[in-house]
Image: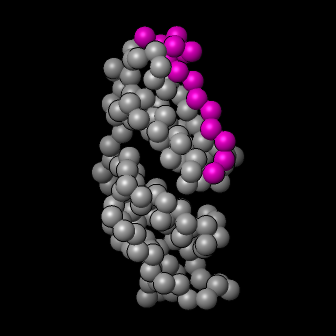
Amino acid sequence: MPAPALYLHLPGTAAEALEFYQGVFGGETSRATFAEFERTDGPASAIAHGMVRGAVDLFVADAGEHDEPFSARGLMVALLGTAEPTTLRTWFAALAEGGEVVDELQRRPWGASDGQLRDRYGVLWLIGYEHGTEPAEQAVTVEP
């Protein structure tokens, strides 16, 4: 069974978000416009359905006139141990660009490392990993 995937309705920024998330996670993108889906509830060139398929799969669309744009409270997307620590640290830094680091990615008293950030689209991410064979990690500091 495939894992659940994030699907965001964005306020006219879906094409930009596809490029951003592909830059972070790699993989392939695809997109279809409102015109291609024969939708009339938004601009013809807006993204009706887009996806990034790669290490992390996610979907984005521009919100149509009857869709509520993405916002979340009390929700966090966890990428805990979903890749090698080096990759997770890279994702953390990349997702933080244009966003806000809520809690630096750092080693915790229980021995694992994790951190939280809200990306430029408002998604709150929890990224972390258990320590194994890698040397001790330093906190990832992201410049605003």
Q: Does the magenta portion include 43?
A: no
Residue 50 position (above or below residue 98) = above
Q: Quadrant of residue 105?
A: bottom left
Instruction: Determine the residue positioned at 58% across, 78% down.
Output: 130
Q: Nearer the viewer, residue 30 or 73?
A: 30
Residue 61 position (above or below residue 92) = above
Q: Residue furthest front?
A: 143
Residue 102 position (above or below residue 76) = below
Q: Nearer the viewer, residue 110 or 37?
A: 37
Q: Nearer the viewer, residue 113 or 32?
A: 32
Instruction: Determine the residue positioned at 58% across, 47% down.
Output: 22
Instruction: Determine the residue positioned at 47% across, 19% down.
Output: 45
Q: Main secondary structure of the magenta part?
A: loop
Give x and y (percent) for residue 124: 39, 56
Give x and y (percent) for residue 87: 61, 67
Residue 115 position (above or below residue 110) = above
- Any part of residue 98 in sight: yes
* In this rendering, position of residue 68 left or right of residue 128: left
Q: Does the magenta portion include 36?
A: yes
Give x and y (percent) for residue 141: 41, 74
Task: Look at the image and give the residue range highlighted in magenta.
Answer: 26-40
Q: Quadrant of residue 81?
A: bottom right
- Any part of residue 7 in sight: no
